[in-house]
Amino acid sequence: MRDTDKTKEQLVTELLLLRQKVIKLEESKTKLLENEIANPKELQAPSEMFNSLINNKEIEKELRQFQVILEEIVTFRTEELSIANKDLQEQIARRQHVEEELQLERSRLFSVLDRLPALVYLIAPDFSFSFANRLFQEHFGKIQGRLCYEVFRGRSTPCIGCSTFKGDHQPIEAHIGEWFYPDGHTYEFYDYPFTDVDGSQLLLSFGLDITERKEAENALRLSEERFSKAFNASPISIAISSMEDGRFIDANEGFCQTIGFTKENLLGKKSMDIGFWVDIDQRKMIVQKLLNKESIRDMEVMFCRSDGEHRAALLSIEIININSEPQPCLLNLLTDITERRHMEIELLRLDRLNLVGEMAASIGHEIRNPMTTVRGFLQILSGKAEYINDQDYFQLMIEELDRANAIITEFLSLARNKMLELRSMNLNSLISSIFPLIQANAMIQDKEISIAINGEIPDLMLDEKEIKQLIHNLVHNALDATAPGGKILLNLYKEDEYVVLSIEDHGAGIDIKILDKIGTPFFSTKEDGTGLGLAVCYGIADRHGATIDIETGTEGSKFMVIFPIARY
């Protein structure tokens, strides 16, 4: 093996061995010299002199070898240091390149942060700003020499209980929230712990200006609040339902009152669940129109309240989208027109009454005059001897003439321009005056009639004859509807600003299908009825500013004549 092929470790080992040999030879040489000095007169033996020369030769040889090895070690070390120096120079160059790249990236980062449309800043644990972007300094001014509590709070000392820097060696915690900054804007801020290049802990904070968003949210909230108030306070019945399954999502108080359900019992249910539809075909037609993208405007429908009452309404439906609902919804507007329809029917009835009354006023007297003449001659002829055997025929003709005259009298009662003789009187006294006659008529038919006066009844301006006729007609109809042994009740009471006279029978009731026709001239459910009795009653009530309401069922009917007190 050549010396140059030896490793540094091998050279060092040989060098140490040679050193030890040289040291031993030096020690031997030193002993010889010491002996010569101690015994100068003694001559050394030739063998000793020879050994000494040999030792010197060996020392020189070892020293030369030692020098060679040492030179090799120096050469090896020099090469090693050269390589290490080269590696070091490369590392330094790489580090400088990395630092330059890092500085460049840092510059790029801060350049990006500086241009962000958000507040970006770094705060050190000593409350100083390490960085603040352009937008921040535009809002809060220059940051050199200023501390965070000065900028944000206008304080001269750190904030008590600072949530960011809680003390020495306390970690900075991430935090998200909203803050109304001193610049008059509202920001959504994001705080994060940030480690700087030197290892120091900083707070990195981003602040997004959400002032416009908050203003928009407030405007939306106010708009929703106004809509909610308008929705709930609207006199129109409004409900929002799902287009997919008809489930009620929301409803105002007016809608709940109209259909007779509380909001708690209504929401989440379908119209079919609450029995809303009287005619299911109407619902099918509405669904089909909505599927065809047709609008629903003031469609007249019949609906059923929670108490089972059927009522008429105008229904309008609009398709709307609600953010909280994945599917389109229906805005339902329901206008109860039951009273309007009753009023229209009442006006139609009154128009008919007026028409009949005008006819009666025109021809009534012209018919009655000849009938009176005929009746007089029949009475004269019936008294003659030659007609003594025809008395039954004369009596029948006179009765029929009287019947016709009674019909004409009722016919004339329908006249719109009939003069009233109004005077202040009490219905209680008026009913009491005719009650014995009514009671006797009921007893003859084996029926019972009673009267109930509830509370104090105020005086009203009434035409006595017409009110008596109204009571007689209503009681007569009640007696006709009641079977023998049945009972009839006359009830008089004050309710709010009205005086109510009700006549209740225990008959079979009135068919709901013909209820709207009741009071129409010449319409009657009796085989021998003229259809004028109730028509006269409606005319009398109208002339007194009163109304007639009907309640009917399988256990009988109740006619209520309602007189307004304020009118008098």
Image (cartoon, rainbow, N blue to C red):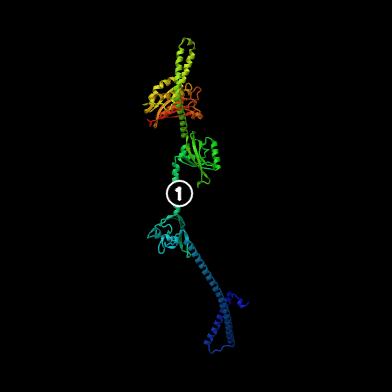
Question: Where does the image place residue 350, in percent across and percent down from the top left?
Answer: 45, 29
Residue 49 appears left or right of 469: right
Residue 182 appears left or right of 310: left
Q: Nearest the camera: 477 or 210?
A: 477
Question: Where does the image place residue 518, in percent across and percent down from the top left?
Answer: 48, 28
Q: Is residue 488 above or below residue 143?
A: above
Q: Nearest the camera: 459 or 209?
A: 459
Q: Residue furthest bottom?
A: 41
Question: Where does the image place residue 52, in percent across and percent down from the top left?
Answer: 57, 85
Q: Is residue 109 above or below residue 383?
A: below
Q: Nearest the camera: 507 or 394?
A: 394
Total marks drawn?
Answer: 1
**Quick one: quadrant of the C terminus?**
top left
Mark 1: few/some/many CA within 10 Å (<14, 14-19, 20+): few
> Which residue is labeled 1 in the image?
220
Q: Is residue 393 above or below residue 211?
A: above
Asked whether residue 445 appears in the rendered view, the answer is no
Q: Is residue 559 above or below residue 35?
A: above
**Quick one: quadrant of the N terminus?**
bottom right
Please, what secondary structure does the residue beneath circle 1 have? helix
Residue 112 appears left or right of 151: right
Q: Nearest the camera: 113 or 430?
A: 430
Q: Amino acid at mark 1?
A: Leu
Asked whether residue 394 appears in the rendered view, the answer is yes
Task: Find residue 411 and report its image quarter.
Answer: top left
